[in-house]
Amino acid sequence: MTRGGIPFLAPMLALSVAGFLVPLVVLAAFSFSDPAGGFGVANYAKLFADPLALPVLFDTLALGFKVVVTTTLVGLPIAVLFWYAGPRERSLIVFLTLLPMLVSNVVRTFAWIVILGRQGPVSQTLAGLGFISAPRSFLFNETSIVVVLTQIELPLLLLPVLAILSRTDRSYVSAAETLGAGPWRILATVVLPLAAPGILAGWVLVFASATTSYVTHAAIGGARFIYLPQYIYREVAVLFQWPAAATVAFVLLATTGIIMAAMALLSRHPRLAAHG
Amino acid sequence: MLNLKLPRRSVVVGLGGLVAAPMFGVSRANAAGSIVAAAFPGSWEDSYRTVIGPVLKSAGTELVLAPALAQDQIARLRASQARGKPAFDAMMVSPGQTATAIENGLIEKIDPSKLKNWSKLLPGARTEWGPNVTIEITGFAYNPRLVPKPRTYRELFENPVYQGKVGWSGFGSNTATIAWVEIAKAFGGSEDDLSPAFRILADSLKKGAVITSNNQQQMALYQQNEIAVFISTVGNVANLRGRGVQCDFAHPTTGSPALPVALHLVKGSTNPNAVYQYMDAAISADVQRQFSMPPTEVLPTNTDVPLTASLKTFITEADMRNLIYPNWAKINPNRAAWSAEFDRVVKK
């Protein structure tokens, strides 16, 4: 019997087909059905004619991009710290990165309600230092949603980057130093390009997770910041308009899928797919 | 030291079996002596689990509770009925959803002879589709340290003392839905015309009104003093008090909307006898007596259970005469449009 091949992939393929592809096809079929039992694009036409739908879609994608940017700004310094750290410090950084993931996203989100609330430490500190005249709530705005999602999604960016960096051969850095490159040049032209596949993988994960994080959107943003997950929930659970909900879900899937595919293609650029 | 030889073939077969096992296993509804009952999340779910769960267990039935708001229950049942396998064996809903459930063929008429406690119920609590286990009284939950006692819906919008301190939510819950109907009436509208309510809502957004996704979020925000007033039920206020949170209840002077809560037998339940056991337990004097005490403090419908002294602080005989029963026949057809309009108004 030969090793590898389709027989070894069969169980996973069967699960993927049964658990993912089949429901996806059912969802697609629903999105193209109408209440009269016919088939067509009426649901999509109705969705894009709704003055609420396109702003909700753009807001959702914009939120995803914002969280990608903020997690990158916060995560890259940690990655650089990891790069220059010794083995014990590296273990500590990995442990601290993984630690929040032991707590459910829902619990972390509700913890942020306390932190950002009127009586929370942020408000009390700012009031105590005189930056604000009285304690106030920092909830119910997009900035707080981005901050909370940054904390929640940070491990999704960091883990692929740390995994790449931990395999990176330090001799590249030694060679660059020998050739006269300073630390910042080494960082910009050696370390970051080598970490780029991990960064891109992290961006894909962060974008997908941030745009679909219903609990965080609802709990931190309230009902005034409507993103596609809440839109889908309303269509399913309040309005019972399942074909419409399937349509919105498919649009979300398609747009995030296109963006993720673009990021994945970018990661295949010869200069970025460096590891061998 | 343990010397375990595990060929790869065995590991793969074993893991495959582990994953495939649920496909051949019994569904949760078929497990001997068990039912899945939907219950409102929060204090309802907690109290039903802790009080009714053991009662059923002693009779050989396992009670599994699925927390879901009334609208969610309808959505889940409609989705699961399409597959021929209901998501629950029993529902817990208010009249609006009862009407929808009947319309969609989701529930069955009950046989009262199977309920030993049927004759103990208030006459109005006995319906052919199932017993009413309580009547939820809705009104204003408020923090007396931060705001004065509210008296009218208009006051919450017009009195500057409440500005930025009131939490509102949309049409996902019955409590909020009937509140918006009452607000519309207060500003010249009706059950057919909610436009005054949406106008005043739009205006209040400029003054810092807090719009939440649901009532549970309002309770969480209330505990953090993010809001000082929200529309809620006597039971939720009692629950907050039971957790040491200062909270009082005020009846609107225009009348307190009342929501009878009924249990229904879902069509296609695989264990209807256990559902009757569950219903009978929920309307029994022992259980209702426990529910009428802190922290749940819901009104009993069993005539053998008197109102507790604590419940009498929430509701008097005069309040009982001033209860408003919403016209769900008018509300239900408009709810979808109202929900969509609410999102359009509040979206930033």
Image: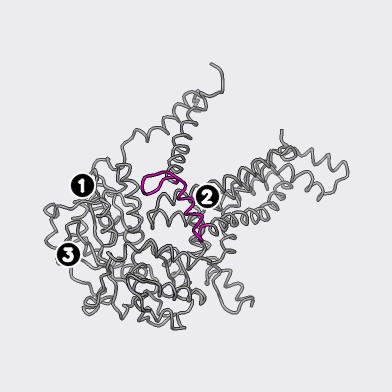
- Which chain's residue wears label 2? A
Name the amino acid type tagged 3.
Asn
Q: Are marks 3 and 2 on the same chain?
A: no
Residue position for label 3: B302
Residue A216 x/y as whole percent: 51, 58
Q: In the structure shown, which secondary structural element does the residue marked by tag 3 occupy? A: loop
Q: Are marks 1 and 3 on the same chain?
A: yes
Asked if residue B5 can be seen in this view, the reply is no
Where residue A142 sits, quadrant-wise, is bottom right
Of residues B281 and A261, the one nearer the viewer is A261
Residue position for label 1: B272
Identify the disc placed on residue B213.
Answer: none
Q: Is residue B104 left or right of residue A81?
A: left
Residue B328 x/y as whole percent: 28, 65
How crowded pointer 2 is (Cα within 10 Å; few <14, some 14-19, many 20+) is rated as many
Name the amino acid type tagged 2.
Leu
* Among the two numbered marks 1 and 3 on one chain, the one whose residue lies closer to the N terminus: 1
- Give the alpha-carbon distance from disc 1 to disc 2, as whole Å: 41 Å
Residue A10 x/y as whole percent: 49, 27
Identify the disc placed on residue A252.
Answer: 2
Residue B250, compared with residue B64, is above or below; it is below
Q: Are marks 1 and 2 on the same chain?
A: no
How crowded pointer 3 is (Cα within 10 Å; few <14, some 14-19, many 20+) is rated as many
Residues rendered magenta in the picture:
A31-53
Residue A196 x/y as whole percent: 70, 44
Name the colour scheme: one colour
How crowded pointer 1 is (Cα within 10 Å; few <14, some 14-19, many 20+) is rated as some
- Which chain's residue wears label 3? B
